[in-house]
Image: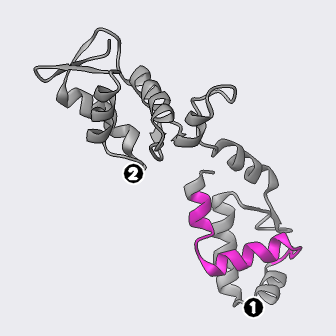
């Protein structure tokens, strides 16, 4: 089960009420209908959708929340964190996996973050045309924490990339 499947399964108010009734102890469709205040056909459809999503087990017998599936989804949906917890807290604060969620206002923190981005995106000594630099920086900006042009400018300002005649290089 993915986070998107979980969110989709619980996006409907009726399915949330059905799931809540099951979590609170309703074990049959008739009990769910009574507790949730929903018509039987809505309950049957909702239980089927929740079962398909992996939230409910026992659609043919005693209904129950699928605790194992929920635990697996919670564990597997944690964002990848490239920074080891022992590493700089700046990376943990401003990155979610390989996506920038914001730029620090303080220059020292911003430099730590930019150095990480430069190290992950560019090989030392390799020459990159501007388009390749932009393509390498755009994925970092997927969450809207900044834009690739701003990152490129900061990388140049901090001398983490050099630019000469439209060609960039990590020193």
43 up-or-down from 66: above or below:
below
Pinpoint residue 171: horizontal percent, then vertical percent: 32, 11
12 up-or-down from 150: above or below:
below
142 up-or-down from 80: above or below:
below
Q: Image quadrant of residue 50?
A: bottom right
Classed neighbour count for the residue bearing mark 1: other residues with Cα under 10 Å, few (<14), some (14–19), many (≥20) = some
Q: Image quadrant of residue 137?
A: top left
Pinpoint residue 76: horizontal percent, then vertical percent: 66, 42
5 up-or-down from 123: above or below:
below
Pinpoint residue 97: horizontal percent, then vertical percent: 53, 37
Classed neighbour count for the residue bearing mark 2: other residues with Cα under 10 Å, few (<14), some (14–19), many (≥20) = few
Q: Residue at x 25, y 34 (%)?
A: 134
Dominant secondary structure, magenta: helix
User: Mark 1 or mark 2: which comes first in sequence?
Assistant: 1
Toward the right, the furthest residue is: 25
Q: Residue at x 61, y 29 (%)?
A: 88
Image disc number at residue 37 = 1
Q: Left of 135 or right of it: where is 106?
A: right
Element under label 2?
Answer: loop
**Marks 1 and 2, how far apart at CA:** 42 Å
Q: Residue at x 13, y 24 (%)?
A: 166
Q: Nearer the viewer, residue 18 or 100?
A: 100
Q: Give the magenta range.
A: 5-28
* Residue 6 located within the stretch drawn in magenta: yes
Q: Left of 116 or right of it: where is 54?
A: right
Pinpoint residue 118: horizontal percent, then vertical percent: 39, 24
Image disc number at residue 85 = none
Residue identifier under label 2:
144
């Amino acid at each position: 089960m993915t986070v998107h499947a979980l969110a989709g399964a619980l996006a409907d108010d009726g399915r949330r009420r059905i799931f809540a009734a099951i979590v609170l102890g309703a074990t049959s469709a008739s009990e769910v209908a009574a507790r949730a205040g929903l018509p039987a056909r809505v309950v049957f459809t909702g239980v089927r959708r929740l079962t398909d999503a992996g939230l409910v087990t026992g659609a043919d017998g005693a209904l129950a929340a699928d605790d194992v599936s929920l635990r697996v989804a919670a564990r597997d949906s944690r964002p990848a964190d490239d920074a080891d917890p022992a590493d700089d807290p700046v990376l943990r604060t401003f990155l979610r996996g390989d996506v920038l969620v914001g730029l620090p206002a303080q220059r020292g923190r911003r430099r730590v973050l930019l150095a990480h981005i430069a190290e992950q995106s560019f090989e030392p000594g390799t020459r990159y045309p501007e388009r390749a630099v932009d393509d390498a920086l755009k994925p970092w900006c997927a969450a809207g924490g900044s834009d690739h042009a701003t990152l490129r400018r900061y990388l140049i300002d901090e001398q983490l990339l050099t630019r000469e005649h439209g060609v960039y290089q990590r020193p």
